[in-house]
Amino acid sequence: MELRQGQVAVVTGAASGIGLAMARRFAAEGLTVVLGDVEEAPLAKAAEELIADGAQILARTVDVSEPDSVRAFADAAYDTFGAVHVLCNNAGVGSGAEGRMWEHEPNDWKWAFAVNVWGVFHGIQAFLPRMLASGEPGHVVNTSSGDGGIAPLPTASVYAVTKSAVVTMTESLYAHLKAEGASVGASVLFPGPHMLRTGLWESHRNRPDRYAKQRPRRTPYRSLDQWESAMKEAGHEIAFTPVEEVAEHVVDGIRADRFWMLPASEHSDRQIRARSQSMLDRANPSYLESFILD
């Protein structure tokens, strides 16, 4: 798909991190950008910065876990600009689950699925029919993760399960669009190849009461900076991928109609090979044994 001035891109989770980087990159291409996020103040700040740089912006608060909220968000985009050409279902949260899987609170799963899985589906259902009806070229990008999308990190199993679901949902979406002969493409995004500095580690700040934890945490939430410091103290240097590189990968992938927005990484390739070989050999998942579950 060709990206050009006058087109409209929609990005959820757009107030910070990967979402804001994508919004900036689309604006740099001359696209009008519709920003959606659950956090009102950071969203307003992001919109102000983009507008100051000359971008045409519409910012709306949206809770992607609520279908009515996403439909209202889509209505605002179409009422204002009359079209949407790129849809990035990017909003996501960590679950805050602790301990073994059988010790997790149901609300940890409910909240993560509401945002990371239902949020993607709500975006598809609210925007895609109108994108298809326009007959214009378009593209849907759904944000997954190497954790779950490629192979699970068992210590973050709830998040991994949701991101695995995003891959399967996008594969199915791709097949449905091809069956329709649609001019709208689909891609699944794996941000990376290294760690990213995003607000995912502080997802709990936006956790709604309806998904509140029902018992106190055994350990306090840990920020990315605290985790990085702990890793350094243990002798592990952590590499980070700038979010701007992820946004560039998205733009390149849309132009190339590339389904797998998966940056080159020998680590990812080893995981893919090991998991695939385990399936082909009908062997136990030994590729998980390197993870420490304590």
Image (cartoon, rainbow, N blue to C red):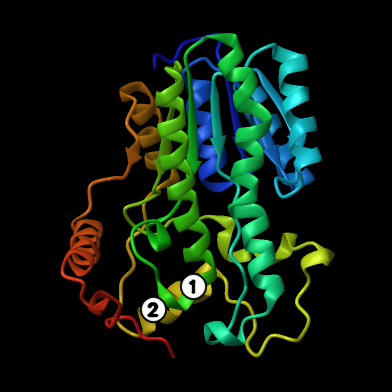
- Between 176 and 225, which is closer to the camera in this rendering? 176
Image point (24%, 59%), residue name: 272
Percent x, y of residue 52: 65, 24
Residue 95 located left or right of residue 140: right
Residue 142, numbered label: none
Name the amino acid type tagged 2: Met
* Residue occupying image coordinates x 59% and y 19%: 131
Q: Nearer the viewer, residue 196 or 268?
A: 268
Q: CA–CA distance between discs 1 and 2?
A: 17 Å
Residue 13 visible to an observer of this rendering: no
**Residue 226 at x, y percent in the picture:** 52, 75
Quarter of the N terminus within the rendering:
top left
Q: How many marks?
A: 2
Return the residue at label 2.
231
The quadrant in which the C terminus is found is bottom left
* Kind of element beneath mark 2: helix
Secondary structure beneath disc 1?
Answer: helix
Residue 156, label in figure: 1
Give whichever of 118, 74 is nearer the camera.
Answer: 118
* Residue that protrudes farthest toward the right in the picture: 209
Q: Are marks 1 and 2 in contact (CB under 8 Å)?
A: no
The amino acid type of the residue labelled 1 equals Ala
